Image: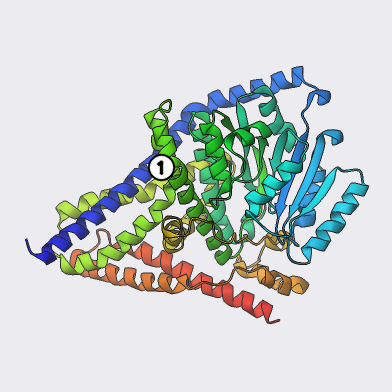
Amino acid sequence: MTGNELILLVGLAVYCLCATALFLYGLNCYVMIWLFSRARQRQESEDRQLLERFRREYGDEDLPPVTVQLPVFNERFVIERLLRAACALDYPRDLLEIQVLDDSTDDSLELTARLVDELRAAGHDIHHIHRQERRGFKAGALAEGMRRARGEHFAVFDADFVPPPDFLRRTIPFLVMDRSCGFVQTRWGHRNREFSGLTMAQSIGIDGHFVVEQSARAWNGLYLNFNGTAGVWRRQAIEEAGGWQDDTITEDLDLSYRAQLAGWQGRFLFDAVTPAELPTSINAFKSQQYRWAKGSIQTAMKLLPRILRQPDVGGFKKLQAVLHLTHYLVHPTIFVMVLLVLPLLMAARDAFQPIVVIPLLVLMVLSMAAPSTLYIFSQKVAYPGDWKRRLWYLPLLTVLGMGLAINNTLGVFGAIFGRKRRDEFVRTPKLGMLAEVHSVSGSTASLYRAGALRKKVAEYRIPLKGMFLIEGFMCLWSVAAFLQYMALYKFIIGPILLLHATGFGYVCVTSIIHESRTRRLSAGG
């Protein structure tokens, strides 16, 4: 065997290995649907009975003190909405403490201080805690607030969330009635779902996670992650898990796994929905996804060795923890496959015979169909009245998922090869009512016609990064692979290559468009 033949064989083996890995991650989507379906009726009955018992046995005088923590950083557009929603929570006022954990460096700091003074004068136990140095970022702010708090339980809301008044009435009973429960997570809703195609696609993806995956994990005794907001923690669980730590960029995922390793249980409430704001700019969305990808892999590297060594944890639960914490490896896997396919096609025409191509095609189709199946299932379960209408945006979500492969691969590489200390925490811009304006044309441009606040919106932008050049290159690379395959093998897996090209092209072009609009706003145009 010559050196070139060996290189070719290795490349083909890597490609097949990547296809198999994608198939395994995809197969788990079907497992999640099955786990959800088998446990839903039992869990709904159990939750209903627990709440009925709580109402019979407990009154307001028996409720525990709760501290609501609101970690914020430069949130001028949403801070008033957040504070007023927190103060409107239906809970005995003498048992409710609110902490505004404000690390802001812009004019929102003064606005927040005025709002806190106003609300305190109205009789609310609300405190404005400002740190001069953002040590530990959100984890550091939550730890500082916990040190000063009087509550036995902590409800956490990010700035883009608007808790409904009955939030504590629906969550605290589970912590009171179940002494092994360390935290309760509610489902995320979407205040600005209809803003644009981008937000519609995001909402479907998030629903897949919360409606199906979180339910399936929680209801079947698997490791459940706290999503950083719209949930409640027991102080004792945080302390016994080692507290909030800032050595990963997803302190919420890290803490929830550590708490469960310490013997605490997590609970997910399917029917309790806390609405939030979706990113309206693709560059903000990419920044959020990068953070989640990097933090998930950081947490996997930190905790998986410990999880796999646990003698009292079954093999299936360990496998699900591996698939859960490493899920973002899907993106570098896609990236490697796209990189390999063109040179393999050009150098190994004879290697891609039907006996090789057809099994690969089956694996890839099943892998790609699995997430879509999960998303369709989640829409049908969560929105039985109009779920079919929402599916018009599923192709856009598929394209978006493909196009994010570069962005999220960089996040994964940042976790594996980056410094041990976490990077600067980049917040996702929240724009309040401006993000809820529905465009007549259906275009994301509606945000940028917001009038007097245009320049302030531009100040909160996530700047365009050089990765759009890589995305553009990968679009052209995928087109070249598509054309090469069409010339050689007609229409077998060519459409998949075209889908990759569409995804990279969409993310690249949309990133440039959104950045150019924000720059015009910043310049006063």
453 lies left or right of 242: right
Amino acid type of the residue tagged 1 in the rendering: Leu
Image color mode? rainbow
Outermost residue toward the right?
A: 121
Q: Quadrant of the N terminus?
A: bottom left
Name the residue tied to disc 1.
Answer: 323
User: What residue appears at the point 29 percent right and 72 percent down from the top-left corner?
Assistant: 480
Instruction: Please name whichever residue, 498 or 414, is drawn nearer the observer in this view of the structure.
Output: 414
How many other residues sit within 10 Å of disc 1, few (<14), some (14-19) or many (≥20)?
Answer: some
Decide which of 518, 252 is in the foreground and name it. Answer: 252
Using residue 490 as the reference point, say whether residue 262 is left or right of it: right
Across and down, in percent, residue 392 comes to 51, 55
Q: Quadrant of residue 513?
A: bottom right
Picture layout, residue 486 above or below residue 164:
below
**What residue do we see at 42% from left, 32% from top?**
317
Secondary element at image label 1: helix
Say which residue appears at 71% left-offset and 63% top-offset: 434
Residue 8, picture quadrant: bottom left
Give the answer, above or below, for where 124 lies relative to 77. Answer: above
Any part of residue 304 in sight:
yes
267 with respect to 39 (left or right): right
Q: Is residue 157 visible?
A: no
Picture coordinates of residue 331, whole percent (x, y): 40, 56
Drawn side of residue 186 relative to residue 33, left or right:
right
